Image (cartoon, helix red, strand yellow):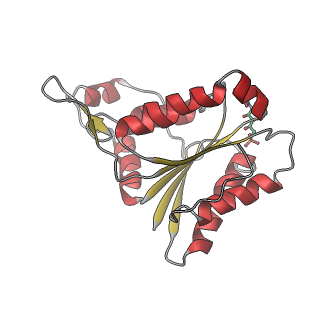
Amino acid sequence: MHVLIVVAHHDPRSLTHGLALHVAEGLCQAGPGNSYEIADLSAQGFDPRFTAADHGLYHGQMPTPADVAAEQARIDRADALVLVFPVYWWSMPALLKGWIDRVFAKGWAFDFSADYALVKKLGRLPVHLLGVAGADQDTYERHGYAAAMKTQIDHGIFDFCGAPVLTSELVLESETQDPTAHLRAAHTLGRHLFSAAHEPAATA
Ligand SMILES: Cc1cc2nc3c(=O)[nH]c(=O)nc-3n(C[C@H](O)[C@H](O)[C@H](O)COP(=O)(O)O)c2cc1C
């Protein structure tokens, strides 16, 4: 099985990158045939700005921009998609949001028109979300931030496109806690990406 791991962080030494690598290691340990590709959006210089060309595609008047087509091809090659990102302002970073804005394009990720209702086109793509957060569980629950993120990201983006979100977890207190347990949980996530039973992570 082949997995695309998307990382939205500028620092390769960050916990976010460390978690992504542990997911990859767990995946490879789970089966010798497993493989992965890391889409390091910052290192590759992905441009998250939604342009006139993207809008032309949205209206069915222009072809898919080359950088968007390349990302869609990466996803098409994958049996599962894993997003690893720091939580910025109770959401994903702008870099990752722009990747979604541009890559999850109308016609490829979903479609609709005056003649037919919404068509969800990513039903074949299991998704795993791993957010890295500075705040603690009490803060996420008291303000409803965890529920808000699930509504916006899990439901609003992936369910809108038909992609099943199989796991969605937050690594909490990432700046103050020893990262060992978080890294182990990421490894476990990788090991179980394609197994029915997924051990709950030592996170939220
Ligand atoms: C611009 C910015 C916004 C942030 N917003 C949040 C937030 O809304 N909620 C939260 O729990 N942590 C927030 N944080 C803390 C980060 O999530 C935390 O520093 C990061 O996940 C640590 O992981 P890293 O070592 O991989 O950078 C924010 C950090 C930055 C830099």
Find the residue positioned furthest to the left: 115
Image position of 6 with respect to 86: above or below: below
Please report the residue visible at 51 percent of the width from the left and 71 percent of the height from the top.
34
Q: Nearer the viewer, residue 93 or 129?
A: 129
Whether residue 47 is visible to the viewer of this picture, yes or no, is no
- Residue 153, image x and y in percent? 51, 33
Q: Is residue 54 left or right of residue 19?
A: left
The picture quadrant for ligand 1 comes to: top right
Q: Is residue 65 left or right of residue 117?
A: right
Q: Nearer the viewer, residue 118 or 86?
A: 118
Quadrant of residue 50 within the rendered picture: top left
Image position of 119 with respect to 164: above or below: above
Quadrant of residue 176 within the rendered picture: top right
Please report the residue visible at 63 percent of the width from the left and 44 percent of the height from the top.
169
Please report the residue visible at 12 percent of the width from the left and 26 percent of the height from the top.
115
Whether residue 168 is visible to the viewer of this picture, yes or no, is yes
Instruction: Quarter of the image for the C terminus: give it.
Output: top right
Q: Is residue 24 left or right of residue 194?
A: right
Please report the residue visible at 49 percent of the width from the left and 60 percent of the height from the top.
3
- Residue 181, image x and y in percent? 80, 55
- Residue 85, image x and y in percent? 63, 41
